[in-house]
Amino acid sequence: MNTVLKKMMVALLALGIGQAAWADNVPDFKETLQAAEQGNAKAQFYLGAMYANGQGVRQDEKQAVQWYRKAAEQGYAAAQYNLGVMYANGQGVRQDYAQAVQWFHKAAEQGLAEAQYNLGVMYVNGRGVRQDEKQAVQWYRKAAEQGDAKAQYNLGLKYAKGQGVRQDYAQAAQWYRKAAEQGFAQAQVNLGEMYYKGEGVRQDYKQAVQWFRKAAEQGDAKAQYNLGVMYDKGQGVRQDYAQAVQWYRKAAEQGFAQAQVNLGEMYYKGEGVRQDYKQAVQWFRKAAEQGDAKAQYNLGVMYDNGRGVRQDYAQAVQWYRRAAEQGYAQAQVNLGEMYYKGEGVRQDYKQAVQWFRKAAEQGDAKAQYNLGLMYAEGRGVR
């Protein structure tokens, strides 16, 4: 399920009259059915929710849709919203984004914040409507002003990126803060980054650490990585490699590639942990396999030098090449040197020149020197 639909599903369960709210007090099915059949919109909505969640009755999404529709057609906002969710997710009906938008719109116009937020999501992604960032901002703002944390965060993103509104870091920070103060982890991370970079707020590493920590303690991998960086560099906190390792590890174990790279480097250098080249290789490999260029370069170095793995020039070349093709200058230099020396590849001065040139054009001093030597020696150049 893609991110948009996951968000919608979360919103369905968070409506407040759904599954979680009824954990200990499920309405009586027969009484609710009787009221619903008499045209009571609230009962129709409740009955739809009971069928949707399988509470008090066997789960039946088609029946849920039927009862939501009856309540929605009477103007019951929560039912309009939930019916929109069913169309968006293809639950009990054929997936139909245009219908989802229609029902979200009806509920949004009645002021239902969840519907306003989801309508904004539909405009951002161009689902059921023509993509329109300005409309997305309009609906996010309506929900945000009602205190919806997801909408506040997304509105902050729009201001930060200048999408649908003029870029305004101060406004971005303001909306991130509102969501962050409600415990919304992604907003806490972004607010921390605003403090780190001094965008929209005065630069303040201690404030950055505070917000990264709040999100990190909720398990947010990016926040855990960022907090690790702060401990690693001693920014906003006393430098503490052991703490850096702890936070890098938490993020790395969630698959966060940059944290895997940094954790590998801590093992390589023996900072905060006992030096262990095999562990370094393990973490570099995890990130490299996700396509991280720095990790690919580092893994190439390990194969090149036989650290933590058996020395293997062909493997070194393979990993240098992957990083080099992503524009990683140090990998381009090292790949050029492998071609120059004929290690792991057939010696080829022209290829060496090609890779030295790519890195040299990025300003890499070693590459510029190597390229100068090639011209001086007349190797790989005319």
Image (tube, rainbow, N blue to C red):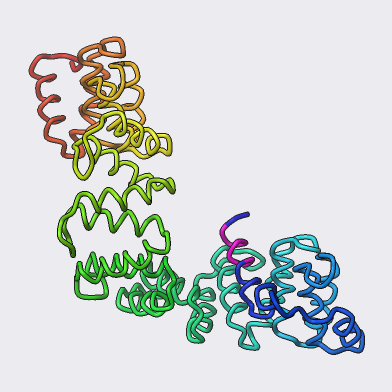
Asked if residue 6 is among those painted magenta in the image, a careful observer would answer yes
Pick out the residue farthest to the left. 376
Q: Give x and y (percent) for residue 331.
A: 26, 30
Question: Dividing the image into 4 quarters, which one contains the C terminus?
Answer: top left
- Quarter of the rendering containing residue 339: top left
Residue plotted at (19% across, 70% down):
203
Residue plotted at (63% across, 54% down):
1
Is 345 situated above or below 97?
above
Q: Give x and y (percent) for residue 34.
A: 91, 85
Residue plotted at (29% across, 34% down):
280
| 279 to the left or right of 359 | right
Viewer-proximal residue among 366 and 245: 245
Q: How many marks?
A: 0
Viewer-proximal residue among 239 and 185: 239
**Segment tinted magenta in the rendering:** 3-9
Is 290 situated above or below 99?
above
Residue plotted at (34% across, 56% down):
224
Q: Give x and y (percent) for residue 190.
A: 35, 66
Majority secondary structure of magenta residues: helix
| 343 to the left or right of 43 | left
| 160 to the left or right of 347 | right
Asked if residue 270 is among those painted magenta in the image, a careful observer would answer no
Viewer-proximal residue among 144 and 208: 208
Is 58 situated above or below 347?
below
- Quarter of the rendering containing residue 330: top left
Pick out the residue farthest to the front. 24
Q: Give x and y (percent) for residue 170.
A: 30, 78
- Quarter of the rendering containing residue 38: bottom right
| 334 to the left or right of 96 | left
